[in-house]
Image (cartoon, coloured by chain):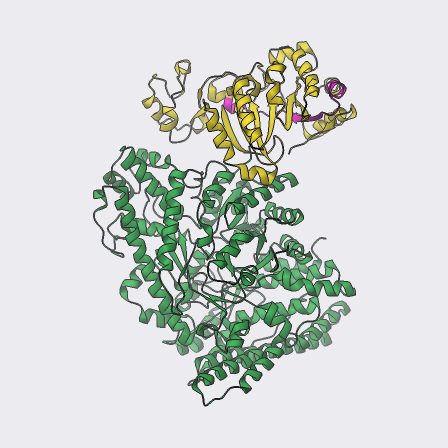
Amino acid sequence: MQIQPFSVNDGEGIRTNIFMAGCPLRCRWCSNPEGFEQKELVGWYKRRCIGCGACASVCPQGIGIGMEERSRCIACGRCVKACPEEARARMVTIMDADDVIREVMKHRLFYSYSRGGVTFSGGEATSQPEFLDYVSRELYDSGLSIDLESCGYFDFDLVRPSLERMDLIFMDLKHMDPEEHRKYTGVSNERILENIEHLGSLMRKPEVVIRIPVIGGVNNSEENIAASAAYVHDVLPEAKMELLPYHSLGIIKYEAIGKPFDQNEFYTLDREEMKKLRGIAAAHGPKIADYR
Amino acid sequence: MAITKRVEKIRDNYVNTKPHISYERAWSWTKSFQRTEGQPHLIRTAQAFYDTCCELSVNIWEGELVVGTSGEFRKCAILTPEFGWLWINDEIDTFPERGQDPYDVTPEQTEFIRKNIFPYWEGKSVEEAFLARTSEATKKIGVDTGFLDTDSKWRNGIGEISADYVDVLLPKGYGGIRTEAEAYMAELDEAIPQEKAKIDFYRSMVLIADGMITLGRRYSKKAAEMAEAETDPVRKKELEEIADVCSRIPEQPPKTFREAIQFVWFVQLGGIIAENPLAWNPGRFDQYMYPYYKADEEEGVIDYDTALELVECLWLKYSEWAWTISKNTASFFAGYTNFENLTIGGTKVDGTDATNTISYMAIQATKECMTHQPTLSCRIHPDCPPEFMEAVTELVSTGCGFPAIHGDRTGYQMLSNLGYRPEDARDWNNCGCVVPHSRKTFEWTSAASISFAAALEFALNQGRSRLSGEQVSLEEKDPKTFESMDEIIEAWKKQFRYLVRHGVISLVTAQEIHKEIGHRPFMSACNEYCMKNGRDLVDGGAKYNIGPVFTGVGLSVTANSLAVIRKLVFEEGVTTMAEIIDAIDNNWEGYEQLRELALACPKYGNDDDYVDSIARDLADFFYEEVTKYDDLYGNHFVTAFMGISNYLPTGKVLGATPEGRHAKDPINEGVSPYTGSDKSTCLAALRSAAKMNHDIHSGGTLLNLRLNHDLVATKRGRANLGAMLQSYFALGGFHVQFNTISNEVLADAQANPDKYRSLLVRVAGYSAQFTNLSREMQDSIMARNAHEAF
């Protein structure tokens, strides 16, 4: 997992994001590919590297500067320490839950003045249900505002206690067509659609925002947006929707972890096109949320 | 409302012309002093002021509504040879061409000044007296060194006064001040020695008042003459109004907003003529101007837009006057900045919110005029109205660096710690850049600049400068033989104590000289208790006499350096003292790998206690050491971390430092993290800075941060910025100021200065036009770390 203090676009106010590794989906446009697996990960930012070889000289596994032998990496972090340019970086680390709590509580004053708090994100926050349950309970008991960002693909009853503590839940709806959904994310959307509906059964009635990451070439058709909005409004009338334009900033991370990424596969919609799609979604009932 | 055509025109002239040196004031002053030989110095000063007010050329420039200029040029820089002329003589030929803050001056002017003005002051100036009385040891470490500098207190006028508009100036007018002085005088007996001195004081008050009254009348007459000759009926009417206003102002208390604005400018002009002062503060402008606005508005004689145009005219007057300073001083205070600090917001004395229409008007005027003056400061209290916070953060988002944002309660606490009564501490305003101050006060707020990093250099180089090799400070053992962290910290303390000691010696010497030949009748007339006590400011007439302030510079560089030594030498043992000393002796050449290790050590500004606790210990020691000493008036010296632009010149004289900095690179200002080393988040930088005990450093603390512009581009983003500010203040922080212009814009401005003449950026504790800064200053601003949202 990774902790990101000072996040301001995932919920109200100033927030700390807790990114939890491990995700059941494999969205082909994912901008946080380091969060696919639940394992520690060291990456290499080629653009920062000066080729000094300090990393290779301390590596117990004999991995070179370019990390071609990365399958042998044990994520011991010696190269991260040795690198003078921060070209080697820990992408995923194992953290003790109490340390996480201590870390996020540091900024409590900033949360209270800004009506901010903590956002559980990913990877996939629900992929570590015990951790989520423990940390969210501690933070809930401290009176902090807590939000959750999820892909929506999880066992609802297993994470229900955690969901009950949330002030705001963001859930993604990537495509209304089950086959298209499977094609681009690796899983069908049935469970996700069910879970959106289930959110209505939560006792504390958290605010819900259903997010569509609008990926040019995947789910940006007007029909898909309309069908998504109609479905959301039908099963969960109080839910808002947020349409986020695709961004390609994740490319650097793919490079860092040595995964291929075809950046020509998807495109970003311009401001006007996004505006139009938001209008279509709104026309089907849901209010449109905006955290920028 | 958009800026009016009038204001736009005045502003264009301000942006596009270089200040011009005027010797009118210096020439009148000199002639007057030639006539008053033998008189008490206080009287001579007041007489010189009066004579200057009678002789100074009177100019009303195109389109002006607020009038009064310190000489024959619209953007005028005047000379005060009575404080120091040696440096002017040395540098005047290079004034037009120098890199930082050039002034126009003609060869004819230079010749006149050298022939007629300087010869009289030879052997009589404050500067010469100081140099004559100062030992070689003190000079070696504390005159033009960059290790310890006090020259703003013996080469220039002092300034650092907040005019008392509330209890003295506005309710009395100079007519009232004159009457009051005469009434006091009538009660005194010249045959009693103590009373005789008071009679001299009150005589000086009468001369000051008469000078100001004369100045106003001369402007009234000039305006009437110009109105007579004016063919444009609109301008004719304006000139007639100016003539009418100045026929009463500043003799009588103003009755309208318009009169009050002109009054405030005349007072400012009087201070400029008297001392050419630094940090001559208008104070809590929104508090004393609001009653005039409210009354006029209720009577229907003024509306918001009319008042705003007047305020904008005043802003341009504040900016047209240029402070005349040496090349060395200009490197400390870059950008023609004269620190006319104007404070808005905060709480009233009764503890309730103080914001009013004028608070917002001041913000709007700054935003529309984009002038480098006044130095706009705001006080933010815990219950600050959200609209005010939005107005403040919206101004921040323009990237102009204004306003300087201060925590109300920390300011209150800083003054309380100096013994202020609650009602005065609550009424604090800002002085200069970030000094909590009061209109009841006499204090040298920027007296000494003391380098923490120089003390480290001396500790690690046997008391010698690493660049020159000269023995300038106390001897110390071979640094390669230090065996523990404690030993090194003790060595630093020993050197630091030595710097403090020579700072104290220098400042007490300067105080003695000012007591003899630095009388300040004009400023004393702006101070309630001087009049009550019958004593000039330099004789301790004010209600609060506060000891001179030492400003610490290089805190984070020094803390970071000590952290490197602790970690790499004494904890991890990956290097030795010998290797570190060799590395910095060689400016890291050949030691690149060691430098990388040093750079990877914990750095102040990332909420890491490993190094933040070192910084706090150093800062606390600074406070303990400095406050041990008393000044000439029996008041203890005061500490601050206020910075100004001193991180450049103080860095230039230092060799490389153990935390990875190269020789001659800048150090850091205030409690700011070292440039580029606060890599975590803005919150971490704020938390590190808040760990310093701000409230004990009553001279003020300064924190500069860069913010990515995107973060404050939306209203919601600005609300988050407001929350960050409130959090920082709740943690005990005092001041923070942001630059939010992207480096792309700044790079373009470097390449195309003509396109960006009006671009204002935060330097340190103040803002200046970016294109008026030297290249190295521009580069150092661009290097400051930008905190981005994720």
Residue depicted at 60% across the width and 68% down the height: B165
Image quarter for residue B8? bottom right
Q: Position of residue A222 (x, y in %)?
A: 74, 20
Chain A, colour shown: yellow
Q: Is residue B648 above or below residue A235?
A: below
Question: Is A216 within the magenta?
Answer: no
| Chain B drawn colour | green
Residue B295 visible in the displayed image = yes
User: Which quadrant of the view contains residue B371?
Assistant: bottom right
Figure label count:
0
Query: In the displayed image of the protein, which residue is found farthest to the top?
Result: A179
Image location (x, y in percent) of residue B63: 68, 65
Q: Nearer the viewer, residue B730 or B535?
A: B730
Residue visible at 22% across and 54% down?
B475
Question: In terms of image quadrants, where is residue B591?
Answer: top left
Image quadrant occupied by the C terminus of chain B: top right
Question: In the picture shown, does residue B84 fall above or below B430?
Answer: below
Per the rendered image, the range of residues in magenta is A228-253
The picture places residue B534, in percent across and down from the top left corner, at 50, 78
Residue A79 in the image, given as x and y percentages of width and height:
37, 24
* Residue B143 in view, yes or no: no
